Image: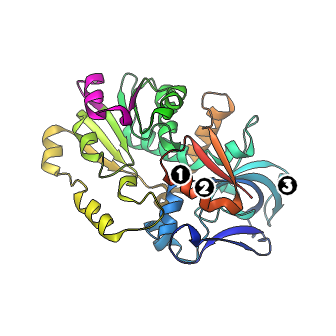
Amino acid sequence: MRRIVIDRPGGYAALRRVESADPQPKAGEVRIAVRACGVNYADGIIRLGLYESAKRLHGYPITPGFEVAGEIDAVGDGVDPARVGERVIGVTLFGGYASSICLAEDCVFALPDGLTFEQGAAIPTVFLTAWFMAHRQVHPEPGDRWLVHSAAGGVGGALLQLAALAGVETLAVVGATHKVDAARALGATHVIDKSAGDWVAAARATAPDGVDAAFDANGVSTMRASFDLLAPMGKLVVYGFASMLPSDGRLNWARLAWRWWRTPRFDPLVMTSTNRSVLAANLSFLSAEAPLLRRGMLWLLERFSDGRLRPPPVEAFALVDAARAHRRIESGQSVGKLVLLP
């Protein structure tokens, strides 16, 4: 088995490729011969040592990765041997950057016909995060308006598709001109290119009465403006703090502290008097809610199977090039989803 290990937090050099014996499935588990594993922005935060669930739920050394796709090649006691050979998607709490992985049977799902392994590995984390925020926190209604940051990325693109399914109008904010067409292709109603001018003024001009929900993974650079753009009864959903983090793979603690200090604090009295709310989501801290996430995954895969949802654009790297993939996703220039090929 080939896998990536982070012995201790650090820069890109902390991603170390190692080889070991293939794991053996325990009772109730299947083993997946991994053909593709998803890369998420959170993986870089794990590498830096700042991802709270990695520290609290696992510790270091750690193999990052929340999702894989491949074929079942062995099963443990209590699992139907006929499952060997099935093309599947696996959802895991860490451990995904590997050529072989054992997972509980209820964390494994049939890969919809017509999807490649690369596309399958690009689905779980971003779409489950989007599904949880959209359908468990915000509850969309036809005619609502959503502001979606990082709209050409993984979670942002998933939110655009879920919004379109629900009849929701979207203001998609992207950080570069080459991402505009990608956001439109994913169903954005309006696209705002942040690199071309004042995105807040453009959002106010498009939605003068405000938005019903804003989804923000940027943190300090946009969070306050996102809240101010909410209509009465609007909800700001925070699921990341990308603008607090480095773009060169190395931590600057003074800069990080400065950005943390500048992060908005929201006054409950103001929220009460304006009927506006702040919500937050972190999928890795929902691992105890496995039945809920399984329902969400089945809901999503049904819609991938019949074409109502489409996988994001995928950019692939070899497993040994995990550091290059991290550089790419942290550059802010990628579109859709990145995967590693073991």
Amino acid under label 2?
A: Ala
Quarter of the image for residue 101 reads bottom right
Is 269 left or right of 291, judged from the image as shown?
left
Q: Secondary structure at mark 1?
A: helix
Using the image, determine if residue 62 lies above or below residue 258.
Answer: below
* Start-end of magenta stretch: 191-211
Amino acid under label 1?
A: Ile
Q: CA distance from mark 2 to mark 3?
A: 31 Å
Is 170 left or right of 68, judged from the image as shown?
left
Q: Is residue 270 magenta?
A: no
**Among numbered discs 2 and 3, the one appearing first in the sequence:** 3
Which residue corresponds to the image point at 27% horizontal and 36% vertical from the top-left? Answer: 234
**Among numbered discs 1 and 3, the one appearing first in the sequence:** 3
Q: Secondary structure at mark 2?
A: helix
Is 272 left or right of 5, judged from the image as shown?
left
Is 233 left or right of 241, judged from the image as shown?
left
Residue 325 tag number: 2
Q: How many marks?
A: 3
Q: Which residue is mark 3?
A: 84
Which residue corresponds to the image point at 69% horizontal and 33% vertical from the top-left? Answer: 305
Which residue corresponds to the image point at 29% horizontal and 31% vertical from the top-left? Answer: 211
Q: Which residue is mark 1?
A: 329
Q: CA distance from mark 1 to mark 2?
A: 6 Å
